[in-house]
């Protein structure tokens, strides 16, 4: 017996956009003004756009933009319910950056090993309202 299923995608309104910002630490600058926008790009798909400005470098402020895709990872070592957004740059090399969701109001940059930096410095971006 063969059973066929028909799925219809219902229109649920506008695609959601989530914006986060903050100043993160930098090795060769006073900080990085980081603005991150996650936008739904269809069912179970997110697109990322970032604007980063390195503040107070020897050449002044240096601004960069990037875009790419997002992989949502559920569960990391020591926290099976954690949600991590892995941002994958569209630029050559496809650099990956991981952000841990801190509730629905903040994202904290974490390492490739999915661990927070052992530091008193701020690695958290706050959600823009």
Image (cartoon, rainbow, N blue to C red):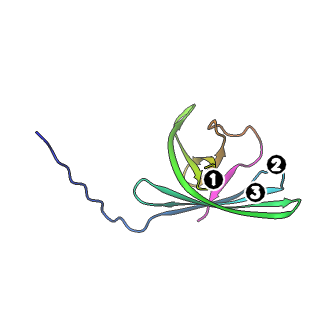
Q: Position of residue 113 (x, y in %)?
A: 63, 35
**Reading the chain from its start, which is encountered first: label 3 or label 1?**
3
Q: Position of residue 59 (x, y in %)?
A: 87, 62
Which residue does the numbered mark 1 point to in the structure image? Answer: 92
Residue drawn at x 63%, y 53% as measured from the top left:
92
* Secondary element type, mark 1: loop
**Reading the chain from its start, which is encountered first: label 2 or label 1?**
2
* Secondary element type, mark 3: strand
Residue at the far front in the pictured view: 92
Q: Nearer the viewer, mark 2 or mark 1?
A: 1
Asked if the magenta segment contains residue 127, the reply would be: yes
Where does the magenta region start and end?
120-129
Asked if the magenta segment contains residue 52, the reply would be: no
Q: Residues within 10 Å of mark 1 (few under 14, many from 20)?
A: few
Instruction: Give the numbered dot on residue 27.
Output: 2
Which residue does the numbered mark 3 point to in the structure image? Answer: 32
Q: Position of residue 12 (x, y in %)?
A: 35, 64
């Amino acid at each position: 017996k063969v059973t066929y299923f028909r799925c219809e995608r219902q229109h649920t309104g506008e695609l959601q956009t989530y914006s986060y910002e903050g100043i993160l630490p930098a090795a060769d600058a006073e900080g990085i003004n980081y603005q991150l926008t996650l936008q739904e790009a269809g069912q179970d798909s997110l697109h990322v756009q970032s604007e980063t400005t390195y503040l107070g470098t020897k050449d002044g402020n240096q601004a960069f933009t990037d875009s790419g895709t997002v992989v949502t990872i559920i569960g990391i070592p020591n926290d099976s319910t954690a949600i991590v957004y892995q941002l994958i740059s569209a630029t050559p090399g496809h650099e990956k950056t991981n952000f841990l969701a801190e509730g629905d109001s903040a994202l904290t940059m974490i390492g490739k090993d999915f661990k927070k930096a052992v530091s008193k410095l701020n690695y958290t971006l706050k959600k823009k309202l």
